Image (cartoon, rainbow, N blue to C red):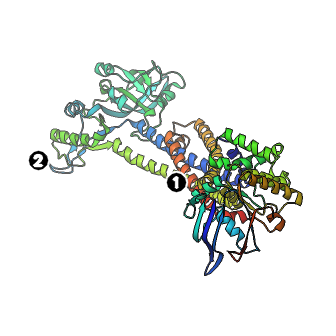
Amino acid sequence: MSATLPRFFWSEYRKRRKRAALITFALFWGTLSILLLMASGQGMNTQFRVAFSGLGQTLIMVYGGQTSLPFEGLPKGRPISLYPEDVDFLKDRIPEILYIAPETYTYLPVSANGKEINRNVHGTTADFGLLRSQVPQPGGRFLNPDDVTAGRKVAFIGWKVAADLFGGADAVGRTIVIARIPFMVVGVLQKKIQDSMYNGPDAEQVYLPFQAYRQIDNRRRINQIHIQPRDPSQSLLIEDRIKTLLGRKYRFDPGDRYATSFWNTIEDGKEGMAIFKGIEIFLGLIGALTLLIGAVGVTNLMYAAAKERTKEIGIKLAIGARRRVIVGQFFLETVFVFAKGTFWGFITAFNIVHLIRLAPINYDSFGIEAYLLRPEFSLRIFLAYMTILGVLCFLSGIFPALRASRANPIESLRYE
Amino acid sequence: MIELDGITKVYKTGSQSLEALRGISLKIGKGQFVSVMGPSGSGKSTLMNIVGCLDTPTAGEYVLDGDNVAGLSFDQLAAVRNRKIGFVFQNFNLLPYATAWENVELPMLFDGKNGKKRRERVTELLVAVGLLDWRDHRPTELSGGQQQRIALARALANDPPILLADEPTGNLDSKSGEEIMAILTELWRGGRTIVMVTHNDHIAARSERTIRLFDGQVVA
């Protein structure tokens, strides 16, 4: 390729450099806005997913209730409770279930290291760790099947419980006392974001093997059952099967909405994701509108350039330039103006996002900052941005370029 | 080489129309040196624009080098201008930001010639017009005569068979004008067809034939 045409382009561009400076800034600002807003939108979306998964991955929780319909001669208003044996009962009959665990809890004093605090103490099984995102800190573990079967006196505690009882010291291997029974801590929950909970965040809970828990709380019934389907799309099917099976077992109408209740996080998550996706699109649109202002500036600049260069265009047409040469020249200049403004906007946005991400999140009071301080870039954002940019660049450049190329060579040569 | 048959050009502005050329028919043979004369408004420029494929006639036929160019598209006419016609304007019409070398190179760039061919041809032309040492100068750094010589070199870049010169000496002092006429004469003697618009009888006398226009018609 000849160096002449790029040099011509540069000479022509330089004449408009000062005027282009403001437009370059508008493009810089537009790019910065659209990328930061899109990164914030995606960050919020991701944080929502992270926070939601803090409760558990694709989780269905089953609770007992009270019948609201008479059934087979039995009156309405009968309480329906869940029992430990319901776990195996359901697992054996519903092949779509991947993990299942019972949970029961009560509020009790927990003491260790000369301190005493009141916390919810739970009895459950090993699958609970997988179901409820109970990831241990390094050096520890969650309750395992042997703990449950043997009724071992071990405990898995939230990180705030560990901090409250042991300060900064390692809690693993230490003993906590609940209802005068000593339990050895085998693991401490790793810090996590959790925006959905019951009875408070997992950071403040104490988990014991189900059989061991029975020694401090001998109620027969359990509070709830946790289930993870093999396929999340089967969550509603599993709900229906549970209603049918429990309805047959405890004699209530499977269509009775109040006999049992469900917290289906898979379905709730879909709604939440739709809301955050909407926010993400809305933020992207605001950013695109900001970038549009810069694009309008470029269009004006290029129309002015076409007017100023009427004579030059006339000369080029007279000596044999085809229309595509003129279109290409104007288009190249448009792309250059866009590239200059958007490149620095991209670099600045990238660095700002990385700086913001350095800010710590307070896991103790998971608030709005947890959503705002974790903007993130992705290939999807980059592709969306490049698509918007490409469309705006094309629309900004094509009309001035076409107008310039359609100049009448005779009139253009006479233009002074 | 150039055959015009019943060429009419009508300009319309609103409800008014102006007949700039009225059924002009003429032939200019290959290798002829023709000057076109006439008072202002006689249609000289319009005729030159049509002959130079910068404009199309309202009616009539124009056959250039055996091809009827009356019905060609904008880009096809551009290709004809690029390869078959060289333009020399009264006010030079060089690109102000381009060097002498680049101005001469431009028609070859539009024709897609490769770098080696362009370099050889530009060098040859700048040597021919005596301005190789001025190759890196921009038009504003050159005298009128030098600028017109660069314009001549540019007109010859793609070695077109026809050279159209619109008052090529109109903006030059007599010495520079004479130099340009000497080059044009040499080109004619080399076999090139030259059509030149001029108001100057002495300049016209250098051509072998003069076409006189009046009110859009050939009168002599």
Amino acid on which disc 2 is placed: Glu
**Co-location on one chain, circles 2 and 1:** yes
Query: In the image, what residue occupies the spot 71% across and 63% down?
Result: A413
Which subunit holds the residue at mark 2? Answer: A
Q: Residue B175: give its label.
A: none
Place residue A54 in its image quadrant. top left
A60 in relation to B185, above or below: above
Indicate left or right for B32 with B65 as reference: right
Q: Residues within 10 Å of mark 2 (few under 14, many from 20)?
A: few
Q: Which amino acid, by three-letter code, is at mark 1?
A: Leu
Tell me which chain the residue with mark 1 is part of: A
Mark 2–mark 1 Cα distance, whole angstroms, equals: 58 Å
Quick one: quadrant of the N terminus of chain B? bottom right
Residue visible at 51% across and 36% down?
A363
Instruction: Measuring from the top left, give residue A88's x and y in whole percent.
Output: 22, 30
Q: Compare marks 2 and 1 and give the one earlier in the sequence.
A: 2
The quarter of the rendered structure image containing the C terminus of chain B is bottom right
Could you tell whether B193 is left or right of A194 in the image? right
- Is residue B158 shown left or right of residue A81? right
- Relative image position of residue A408 (x, y in whole percent): 64, 64
Foreground pick, B49 / B35 = B35
Q: Which residue is mark 1?
A: A285
- Expressed as whole percent of the image width and height from the top left, the position of residue B54 reads 65, 62
